Image (tube, grey):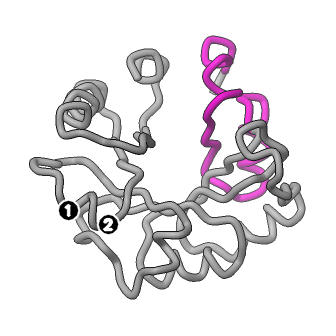
Amino acid sequence: LKSSLAYGVKLLQLRQPKLCQNQIKIAQQACQAAGAQLQLNCSPEEFKKFKNLDGVGLHLASRHLMALAKRPVPLNVLFGASCHNRQEIQQAQTVGADYLLLSPLLATRSHPDAEPLGWQAFEELVASCKVPVYALGGMRPEYIAQVKTCGAQGVAGISSWWGSLSAASD
């Protein structure tokens, strides 16, 4: 968290199966001090259990997204969703997501059995979006320019990204 914020990451998703109030508070304070936005990846029900989440947003996995009938948080809470196909993108936009992660663009070690979208399908899906899109899946800093050429806002990353933070130029 500290190195990501020091590098300049401005949108950070806390994806941890067992979130606790104390961990969230620490992450919230660190993000606020760095001028970054913290997003919790959890169910809408779990999100509502936490107290004093000023400036903290909600990010939903696609399984939670597809179960929604409406936006699960007020308009002043940043709301994002993970999407993998046109149906999930449509659902995210229908329920008022502010942004989405679209994955997997490329093959990834974290989900080796997932079929990558590839650049052409990714670009076509991004063109159908009315909200900012971040690419996920096999992303590295050197893909930022190409992702933006496809119409996306930028990249999101997990394992292959963090080792490259010091080498990235954007």
Instruction: Tell whether label 2 touches label 1 (CB within 8 Å).
Output: yes
Say if 127 sits above or below 91 in the image: above
Say if 52 sits above or below 170 in the image: below
Task: Give the residue at mark 1.
Answer: 48
**Image coordinates for residue 11, horizontal then vertical, percent:** 43, 41
Picture residue at 48% right of the left edge, 72% below the top: 65
- The answer to whether residue 94 is left or right of residue 105 is left
Q: Does the magenta stretch include residue 98?
A: no
Q: Is mark 1 on a helix, strand or loop?
A: helix
- The answer to whether residue 107 is left or right of residue 23 is right
**Image coordinates for residue 106, horizontal then vertical, percent:** 83, 47
Direction front: furthest residue: 18
Which of 29 and 19 lies nearest the eye of the viewer?
Answer: 19
**Image coordinates for residue 75, horizontal then vertical, percent:** 26, 70
Task: Give the residue at mark 2.
Answer: 44
Q: Which amino acid does label 1 sit on?
A: Lys
